Amino acid sequence: NAGVTQTPKFRILKIGQSMTLQCTQDMNHNYMYWYRQDPGMGLKLIYYSVGAGITDKGEVPNGYNVSRSTTEDFPLRLELAAPSQTSVYFCASRSWGEEQYFGPGTRLTVT
Amino acid sequence: GQQVMQIPQYQHVQEGEDFTTYCNSSTTLSNIQWYKQRPGGHPVFLIQLVKSGEVKKQKRLTFQFGEAKKNSSLHITATQTTDVGTYFCAGLNNAGNMLTFGGGTRLMVKP
């Protein structure tokens, strides 16, 4: 199993540009999550999904959108990028009652 | 909403000294999980505690879950340089769909 994969690993965006961060898991997990982690800080939940077709907002959803058309994929869309969205983005997945598996992260800089 | 607080935020120790990080939730938790994040890496699952008053050990690491299921601790005996990283606790809500992460404790070990 590859686990949780994220692309790209790094990205530099200009203010106002848009992009999609990809996340795929091959463990047939129902639950998937997107977090952002600012330097030296903890993890803040952006959006989560409890299954295909179901998504819900987390703590900091503004400026982001998600979709979950399949069990495997949970892309995160940034519209009109702003410098405040400079961060490391982690995707994670898990099964009911089990631990959470994290992807390697996407390091995003908005200038 | 559920809040999980973690102290201390930082801890510098001499190699061989002990280390403890504490985690407190504003609400009763279904379970609590601990993760370790090495510098530049992603969070990796360490352990899950489910029962009130539960204590689990992993070599030099001892994890406790409080009787009221609102607090937890991680104790490392005789730290080593390989213990360097940030330790996060995460509480699972009663609906079982979301983990709320504490802010993390960053451990630095001087050789």
Image (cartoon, coloured by chain):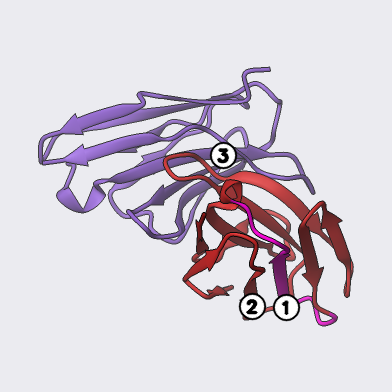
Q: Chain of mark 1?
A: B
Q: Is residue A33 above or below residue A14?
A: below
**10 Å neighbourhood of mark 3: few (<14), some, or many (≥20)?**
many
Q: Position of residue A16 (x, y in %)?
A: 11, 39
Q: Nearer the viewer, mark 3 or mark 2?
A: 2
Query: Do tag 1 and tag 2 residues touch (Cβ < 8 Å)?
Result: yes
Secondary-structure class at tag 1: loop
Q: Is residue A79 visible?
A: no
Q: Colour of chain A?
A: purple
Dot label at residue B70: 1
Whole-number angstrom distance, CA of label 3 to CA of label 2: 23 Å
Q: Amino acid at mark 2?
A: Asn
To which residue does mark 2 refer? B24
Residue B71 part of the magenta-drawn span: yes
How much space separates mark 1 and mark 3, taking CA atoms? 24 Å
Q: Which residues are magenta?
A: B67-80
In the image, which lettered chain appears red? B
**Which chain does the residue under circle 3 lie in?**
A
